[in-house]
Image: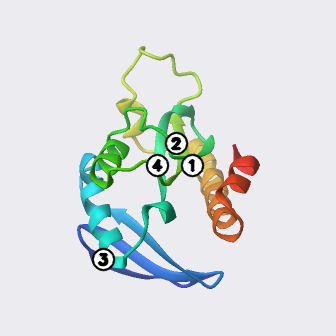
Amino acid sequence: MPKFLLERKFNSLVSKGVFNDKEIILVLPETFMNKSGQALKKILSYYKIRTANLIVVHDDADLEKGELRISKDRGTAGHKGLDSIVGVLKTRNFVRIRIGVRPKNYIPGSKSLNRFVLKKFTKPEEKIVAEVIKKVNEAIETILKEETEKAMSKFN
């Protein structure tokens, strides 16, 4: 397992390490979600990273809790964080790993999704989250070792 050093830079938590002889930079913007593109643009510029090498991991209310989907060069589906990233970077040419947060029995329009998205996980949900985190790690490893399309075939 690679070792990562953590630092604060450009309103983000940044951690750098090496995986499979490739430098990896993990970024967690500490801005409001709808401003995450601004922080990300500064990081990409500072480290001279092309957007084609960017992998964005985010929640997705269109997917059931625990589901995972990988996509590339797609629209934002109204996700405020993605709207910010696409708007600031002026491209959709990056990989997205979408993690489902919608409750299993949720009926669209019945209740605000914020009620589910912003609350703490229950014990059963914690197990679901732990499993999806493992899958996300595997998906990222597949993207880095092989290619995005291979990861999409395996995890979608």
- What is the quadrant of residue 15 in the picture? bottom left
Closer to the chain start, of discs 4 and 3, is 3
Which circle's residue, 1 or 3, is located before the other in the chain?
A: 3
Residue wearing tag 1 = 126
Image point 42% across, 38% down: which residue?
A: 76
The residue tagged 3 is: 46
- Tell me the residue at 50%/46% (across/down): 73
For the residue pair 21 and 15, the one nearer the viewer reads as 21
Q: Position of residue 111 (x, y in %)?
A: 39, 19
Circle 3 sits in a helix, a strand or a loop, which is it?
A: helix
Q: Tag 2, which secondary structure?
A: loop
Disc 4 + disc 3, Cβ < 8 Å: no
Q: Which amino acid, by three-letter code, is at mark 2?
A: Thr
Total labels drawn: 4
Would residue 126 appear left or right of 38 to someone viewing this image?
right
- Where is 145 relative to 120, above or below? below
Q: Residues within 10 Å of mark 3 (few under 14, many from 20)?
A: few
Mark whose residue sits in front, 1 or 3? 3
Q: Amino acid at mark 4?
A: His
Q: CA distance from mark 1 to mark 4?
A: 17 Å
**In this rendering, the label closer to the viewer, 2 or 3:** 3
- Residue 29 lies, in percent from the top left, at 32, 61
CA–CA distance in space, label 1 to label 2? 6 Å
**How far is the residue under mark 4 from the one under mark 2?**
20 Å
Identified at 50% across, 41% down, the residue is: 74
Write down the residue under mark 4. Answer: 58
In the rendered image, the quadrant that contains the N terminus is bottom right
Image quarter where the C terminus lies is top right
Name the residue beneath numbered marker 2.
122
Q: Residues within 10 Å of mark 2 (few under 14, many from 20)?
A: few
